[in-house]
Amino acid sequence: MDVYSVRGEVGNRLSFSDCVAGDGLARTLDMKAEDVLEAVTKSGLRGRGGAGFPTGMKWKFAREQAEKQKYIVCNADEGEPGTFKDRLILTDFPELVIEGMAIAGIIVGATKGIIYLRGEYAYMRSHLENAIESCRKKHIIGNAINSNPDLSFEVEIRMGMGAYVCGEETALLESLEGRRGEPRNRFPFPVESGYLGKPTVINNVETFAWVPCILSKGVDWFSSVGTEQSKGLRLFSISGDCEKPGIYEYAFGTPLSKLASDVGAKKTKAALVGGASGICVPACEFNRVLAFEDLATGGSIIFFGENQDMFAIAENIQAFFAEEGCGQCTPCRIGNVRLLDIIEQIKEKGMSESDVEKIKELSITMQTASKCGLGQTAPNALLSIVEHFGDELVANG
Amino acid sequence: MNTVAKAESVDQDEMDETVCKKIEEIIVSGFEKYGRQRNALMPLLQDVNHEFGYVPEFAMVLLSDEMKIPKSEIYGVVGFYSFFSSKPKGKYVIRLCRNMSCVMSQNNQGLSGDSAVKKLLETLGFVKKAPGQTQRHPVTEALMSELNIDFGETTEDGLFTLEATNCIGMCDQSPAMMVNEDIHVKLTPEKISQIISDYRGS
């Protein structure tokens, strides 16, 4: 299958188009590893998967580990409903991703990288294998990176098999190790004990792709845009009720209203920011900004037109979690099914005060006591829908 | 690995000898490519699943014996991932996305309701089966009538299995579905007829 046949539309100019594979690595090799790490840290780059952990700090922790064998893992398991920007990056800029992994390897002292590609993206496996081969020819990876015999880095692709929870980094590690994708306890964090118990850096596709760009274009280029705590640019996957769905690049701090107008979202009732694990923002709050300080997201934005039934959306989301939870911990396993039950009941009888209480109580339990991010965030969208669109639900009764 | 005799707990009557031989070949060559450590299990199972469209019990028992992994754990891994199957499926597995953007774009083709989700929930036992005819989306309807099966079922000729799946990352080109590893986007009832007849012909 031709990967470009489902490439999708890119709504505005992407900075990745201005970065040449190999330039960032060349800069890296001119510098001491500490200075490269310092540059990544100073740029303010934070994880683009959604959690937003500072990339430089993660790499520093991994670098400090005494173990000889370390791993770099690229999380290409974007399964959050509404997210597809990594698909575009892997289609158009796979070499930047591989280069970012190689740079991470040089900094933390790892010689092996793994791309964990979601099963749904199996169609681009050979495309990525070609990109790996091309990087080897350009000496971005291989036995002698940029002809330096002391530096080597190899990348292999491992496939996911359709489990959303494997986007959670410790579930991803379990899957790589040949187990069910059930998240691990922290501590220890993967930077101390990750793949096969060795120090492991796991970053999102987009996070890796920004690294060579930051190094070739400079820290200031990157950190001069964005907000205080959210530096730089990021990609957004925008879909739903709008004229021009697709992949867009914006600086952190951009208001939701700007996105709505760029994609031609008209007569909009709400936007789901952050996918199924995100929150529903009503149109009257579209002045809110996309940044870790306000609306934190992995880049998924879905617009809902005024004719959409917010309750059907809530049901869709809870059904998603009821199916995709790993089943390991009780709050998530039972909680999602119970929330779905409550939604079914409300659909029949309308929503009462006690239903709202039940939803809130159960949600707090899930947010507090679930083992991983999946269960902790599963009730968020429903809570925001009850808060902002509760009157629609009462009206059903 | 020289013999498959260890895997005797499998009901041999059900397994064709040539199938067993093929499984053995795949696993032997898998061991050469991926090794025999636990972290080789996913790619090994993937190779078997890719060849047969499911993981026969014979393969699970064989892997258990050869890799010294309890059978229950191998069954557990196969059962966990939705793209593995322990039962035979159609030659082409159709997975229609049932998440928000895909369902909404079906809505916008003129019908209200949420029947792909409903169907899935019924299949999983989360909700009671709705009495009578439910209104279906045009694409969902087209798939079901073209194949003459319900979600979770396989056509009599063994060609197609129809399933609903979660987000396949094509929200901007919705509605979308997978057929084995291929992706089909911007679906319409007309496109569905074309796609199905193309697979029937190939």
Image (cartoon, coloured by chain):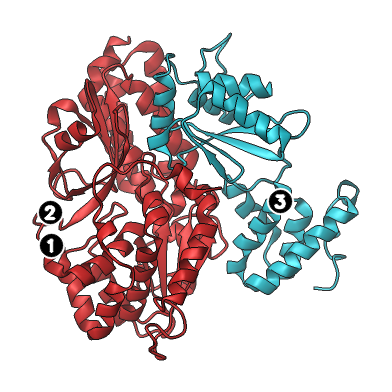
Chain colours: A red, B cyan
Label 2 Cα neighbours within 10 Å, binned few <14 / some 14-19 / many ≥20: many
* Residue position for label 1: A223
Q: Is residue A158 visible?
A: yes
In the displayed structure, does residue A4 sit left or right of residue B88? left
Name the residue located 48 percent from the left edge and 38 percent from the top edge.
Answer: B166
Label 1 Cα neighbours within 10 Å, binned few <14 / some 14-19 / many ≥20: some
Label 3 residue SS: loop
Name the residue located 86 percent from the left edge and 50 percent from the top edge.
Answer: B15
Q: Is residue A188 visible?
A: no
Label 1 residue SS: helix
- The picture places residue B133, in percent across and down from the top left corner, at 57, 10
* Residue position for label 3: B55
Q: Amino acid at mark 3?
A: Val
Q: Label 1 lies in what chain? A: A
Q: Label 3 lies in what chain? A: B
In the displayed structure, does residue A129 sit left or right of residue A204? right
Q: Quadrant of the C terminus of chain A?
A: top left
- Report which quarter residue A314 is drawn in: top left
Q: Label 2 lies in what chain? A: A
State the residue lying farthest toward the bottom.
Answer: A149
Name the residue located 28 percent from the left edge and 54 percent from the top edge.
Answer: A51
Label 3 Cα neighbours within 10 Å, binned few <14 / some 14-19 / many ≥20: many
Front residue of A311 and B184: B184
Q: Amino acid at mark 2?
A: Gly
Mark 2 to mark 3 CA distance (whole Å): 49 Å
Name the residue located 30 percent from the left edge and 67 percent from the top edge.
Answer: A20
Q: Amino acid at mark 1?
A: Ser
Judge if badges 1 and 2 mark residues of a common chain: yes
Front residue of B14 and A368: B14
Q: Is residue B92 above or below residue A305?
A: below
